[in-house]
Image (cartoon, rainbow, N blue to C red):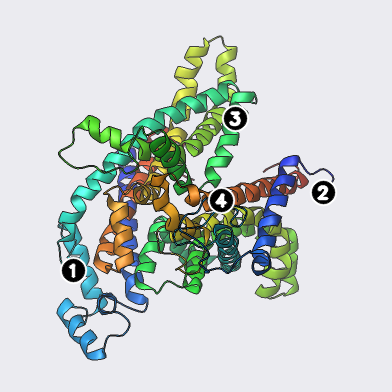
Amino acid sequence: MFRYMPVSAMIGLTVTGLYFLAAIFAPLIAPYGMAQVVGDVWEPSSSEHLLGTDNIGRDLLTRMIYGGRTTIFIATMATILSFVTGSVLGFLAAVLGGWADQVLSRMVDLLMAIPSLILALVVLAVLPVTVTTLIVVMGLLDATRVFRLARAVAVDINVMDYVEAAKLRGEGRGWIIFREILPNALSPLVAELGLRFIFMVLFISTLSFLGLGVQPPLADWGGIVKENKDGIIYGIGAALYPAIAIATLAISVNLVADWILNRTTSLKGGRG
Amino acid sequence: MHPILKLVSQRVALGLLLLVSSSAMIFGLTEALPGDAAQAVLGQSATPEALENLRREMGLDRPALVRYVEWLGGIVQGDLGTSITNRLDIATSISSRLSNTLFLAFWAAVVSVPLAILLGLLAVRYQNRWPDKAISGVTLATISIPEFLIGYVLVYFIAVQMGWFSPLALINDTMSLGEKLHSIALPVAVLTMVVLAHMMRMTRAAILNVMQSAYIETAELKGLSSFDVIRKHAFPNAIAPIVTVVMLNLAYLVVGVVVVEVVFVYPGMGQFLVDAVVKRDVPVVLACGVIFAAIYISLNLVADIVSILANPRLRHPK
């Protein structure tokens, strides 16, 4: 599987892996405590503080490592939520058909008629902003896209002979969805997984940057950009590091997703 | 009625229906979720009596449906309600901000649309050679980069290090057009970069798709000059997808503008919305949300109608 891996996918996989490892082992590799003030405001980088310090004198490298942990955790959980909700409802709509399909599809149309960021802002204006709320709001808003994909794929599979056979055999809906449709719909869904994850990383970073995501003192990449953005005017680039981290993570995941997409589609004999 | 007119009016009616239902959804979301405007004003520690009084004063004790109908009726007449934090009329505070945002989005569109179509054509002309590859590489990068990174990189290098522009895009009515344009140059550049790659790639795909059709080959084979092939056969067929691409990206600008306005502290709708969400000023959030939704839905509607008009095949859906 890895023998014919293109260089770009290899780079993508390595960088993504490093970010995930750093996220998992954050308390072990971070040189200081997450909210520990260890120096002056916006110290330049030195041997003690590799990336310098932030707007209130915390070690920036430490903040970045813990920030990555929060960002990646929220993005991963929201992606999982979005996939589970979106694909189960999508498969259900395809299998049930009729009015259930109509109701679900029109609801999704309605949700998608408004940009997710605007809808998220409206919801966050009334809900208390906690990590759980963020994951649920982001996951459910994004589930609409997974729903469309899952439904489209499942509608095609639902008319296949083996599904007909299973129905005639008298299998229940649960069997049809999880044993017949799911295995066959997996490859397009997996290819979409990477893109949804990137979207989640950008989404949570944007919300935190706007001050409506992860709340201080908890660090996340978008929040670190917000905390340090005032330094930019004085020529201090502290806000650029987390922004670059977001961009490199997103590009790496994209490279891997592209490779998976090419692989899964070439298995089926080209994109169709 | 003329069949096209009928189809277009159907689409407009559908768009209006979508608009009304999305306003209901926005209103319903703030209604159904725990916490309301009174709670937001008084905070979590408010006594039940104080909440009760404020709810009565704000009219929140009446049924949600009645308030929704009143609210919607107000919007139709241009009355967006009053802010709960500063008690100002929302319509007056929004109007100048809306025109600022439209001003920013307009210039971003003026720069990005022709540039994207030109670069898309270049990518088709040099297909699979280096200009094409460079364009797809840049596309991948800009899709993955958050808007605020592009914004701060430009601020850091161009505004702070070079000192060509101000890092803040502050505009007011006393400025001349030239001054305004100078001060919004950086936000326009960011918004252009945000939508350019996407628009370019989709334009490229649209034109390539048309150029590979059998009728283009026929036109070439029957001896038409390449200019005539493009003018008579390729262009009319490529126009619908290109307009759709342009409209979708203009709709995307509506969202991009929120972040870019915060980066450049630009006095527009996006900044206004974000401030209102932070202050939990629900009436302002509702008003801004509905305006953003209306702009987004109408741009999508225009894209839909233009593609119906440009492509006769879409007029007879099977």
Q: Are marks 2 and 4 on the same chain?
A: yes
Nearest the camera: A146 or A222? A222
Q: Badge 1 is on which residue?
A: B70
Q: Residue at x 53, y 28 (%)?
A: B207
Nearest the camera: B282 or A115? B282
Q: Badge 2 is on which residue?
A: A2
The CA distance from mark 2 to mark 3 is 27 Å
Label 1 chain ID = B
Type of amino acid at the residue the image marks with label 3: Ala
Please state which of the two labelled residues, at mark 4 or mark 1, is closer to the viewer: 4
Secondary structure beneath label 4 = loop
Residue B308 shows in this picture: no
Q: Which numbered circle lies on residue A37?
A: none
Query: In which quadrant is the C terminus of chain A drawn?
Result: top right
Nearest the camera: A30 or B11? A30
Label 2 chain ID = A
Q: Quadrant of residue A193?
A: bottom right
Q: Which numbered circle lies on residue B134?
A: 3
Q: Which numbered circle lies on residue A45?
A: 4
Label 4 chain ID = A
Nearest the camera: B23 or B217? B23
